Amino acid sequence: MRTWQVERRKRTRHLIELGGLVVKSGIVDLTGDDRAMIYGAMIWVAEKLKSDDGQRARTLWAEKGKEAFATEQKRAYDRSD
């Protein structure tokens, strides 16, 4: 496989994973799959990260994400028993 094909597949996988996070967060259902609203929310998040309060937001959001992943993993483990 050519280098550009490998890179393209890596990029595609990355984009699919990011899209999965958008769905997993519930934002798609909450917005009725309104792409303009979702994009606007993402722009708002980016602006927040660039602001003076950006580091605080990073810390809070990272912790919330880690907790959600841990909860999800625990539920999956509990179902496998």
Image: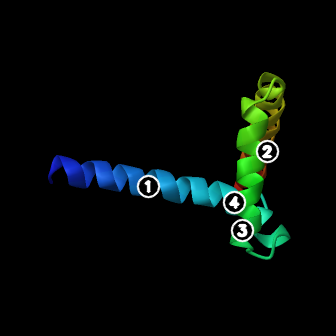
Q: Residue 72: percent from the left, percent from the top?
A: 75, 50
Where does residue 55 sit, x and y in percent of width and height? 77, 23
Which is closer to the viewer, label 2 or label 3?
3
Mark pair 4, 2: CA separation: 22 Å
| x 62%, y 59%: residue | 20
Checking the image for residue 13, the label placed there is 1
* Residue 7 coordinates in the image, percent (x, y): 29, 48
In the rendered view, would you say 35 is above or below 64? below
Q: Nearer the viewer, mark 4 or mark 2?
A: 4
Report the side of 8 relative to 37 (left or right).
left
Q: Which residue is mark 4?
A: 39
Q: Are marks 3 and 4 in contact (CB under 8 Å)?
A: yes
Q: Which image quadrant: the C terminus?
A: bottom right
Dot 4: what SS?
A: helix
The amino acid type found where label 4 is placed reads Tyr
**Residue that extends furthest to the left in the rendered view of this protein:** 2
Q: Where residue 43 sits: x, y (%)?
A: 71, 50
- Give the CA distance from mark 2 to mark 3: 26 Å
Which residue is depicted at the point 47% across and 50% down?
A: 14
Please state which of residues 22 and 76 is positioned toward the viewer in this rendering.
22
Going from N to C along the chain, the mark reached first, 4 or 2, is 4
Query: Circle 2 sits on which residue?
Result: 68
* Helix, strand or loop at mark 2: helix
Q: Earlier in the sequence, mark 2 or mark 1?
A: 1
